[in-house]
Amino acid sequence: MALHEECGVFGIYGAGEPQAVQAVQLGLYALQHRGQQSCGIAVSDMGVMRCATAMGRVSEALNATAAGQQREGLQTLTELSGQLAIGHVRYAAAKESLPENSQPLVLHYAKGRLAIACNGQLGNAQALRERLAETGAMFQTSTDAELIGQLVARERVQTHSIEQAVLRAMPSLVGAYSLLMLSPRKMVAARDPHGIRPLCIGKLGERWVIASESCALDAVHAQFVRDVEPGEVVVVDGDGLHSLRDHCQNTPRVCIFEYIYFARPDSVIDGVCVHDSRVKAGRLLARQYPVEADIVIPVPDSSTDAALGYAQESGLPFEMGFMRNNYVGRTFIMPTQKQRRRSVDIKLSVIADSVRGKRVVLVDDSIVRGTTCQNIIRNLKKAGAKEVHVRISSPTLHWPCPYGTDIPTKDELTSNHSSVEELRDYIGAQSLGFLRRESLCELMNAEKRCFCDACFTGEYPYPAGE
């Protein structure tokens, strides 16, 4: 089973070429790895707001909306035009993968309309939902985005601007969020006070662009300007970009798995190149767990950079041991373990000539339950691999994540009930090594911890259960 994180956001303010809707669509293509279950775009055209959402990947879902297969009451892409636009790609657990949970969400309230797209998860979502329900709130979705939107709408009727409403709502939001909001004439972005999820700012001519990752800026040829600071609220309107830093006093704690697995390797997050951090993880693994072998192969695609680093440091040849079927989707989406195993067999096909008769170092980014890794090793040995030595570019997982990462309960994490040697026996490897926890600072080029590693340590940025 692979880990996953929920969602990506992209927004643009200002007219020009490409048009706002087309620019957002291109940005969402670049963020597709962050969510493949639904997507959507909301626009404001001279103050008139419209939205289109659909289930599926960007290439299928947004084209489907253009063909008139959108949700009832929403416009097709061909009907969307405007100077402001925000978009969203979403991943969710199977029970939450519903059309009504697609984003952006458009809310109607006393001051007009508000569209919102959010990446992350609130640790106090249930408490907020109950509190709002007690005051008469009705919910159309099960998303945190709707909770945030309702809180902002309530604050907006008591203050003079949407950005002030966001600032006033933020103390009630406990957890990870990088969000974009669209009012009729403004685009507002916010990042939680610890900056757990990434968010960055770019410029395309005179237009401002905000995205989950810098790779999405590259997709529209926007120039990277800077990251949104943890706790910062950014406002873009007719007078340009403005920054509000009322909540910027906390220690940054970006999720370490952005660098290990989630983000695209060509992204730069908080000044650190994702590709470089993964190569460094592989080099560290080679120093910490050397082994006599013939080749190094990755589990594609997220482990390719770490495998390259292992090969460079060890002097072993780097090979592609698998052919990856990019059209299957990700194994974590499958609701049952049996389906996940079948998906692995379809998704990863061993290149037998690369591994036959060889001692293989197999590099992967994590082990959650161990069954996927077990299946991969079984297939490698069926193809003739003499030995398989597994190296994992993250430490052992021990704690669930309340901030949007799809990590199961403590009981489901195999490292909580198996030693490394027991896990090695279970997956069928000749040896097994995990990146040492004290090495994580080196991935970030940092002298002290400036990231969230709670899934390894249980030390959460926000008090557990708050």
Image: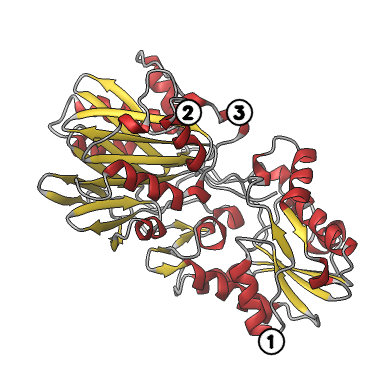
Which element is circle 1 on? loop
Residue at point 62%, 60% (across, down): 301
The x and y percentages for residue 291 are: 78, 80
Q: In this figure, what is the number of numbered marks?
A: 3
How far apart are labels 1 and 2 at the CA level?
Answer: 48 Å
Most foreground residue, 182 or 356: 356
What amino acid is found at the position of numbered circle 3 in the picture? Lys
> Which residue appears farthest toward the left when viewing the image?
239
Q: Please name the residue that numbered disc 3 is placed on.
A: 95
Mark 3 or 2, nearer chain start: 3
How far apart are labels 1 and 3 at the CA level?
Answer: 46 Å
What amino acid is found at the position of numbered circle 1 in the picture? Gly
Residue at point 51%, 38% (across, down): 60
Tell me which corner region of the image, top left, top right, bottom left or bottom right, holds residue 430.
bottom right
For residue 315, which numbered disc appears in the image?
A: 1
The x and y percentages for residue 309 are: 61, 77
CB-based contact (under 8 Å), mark 3 and mark 2: no
The x and y percentages for residue 3 are: 62, 50
How far apart are labels 3 and 2 at the CA level?
Answer: 11 Å
Q: Please name the residue that numbered disc 2 is placed on.
A: 101
Residue at point 65%, 69% (across, down): 435
| Relative to 86, residue 226 above or below | below
Which element is circle 3 on? helix
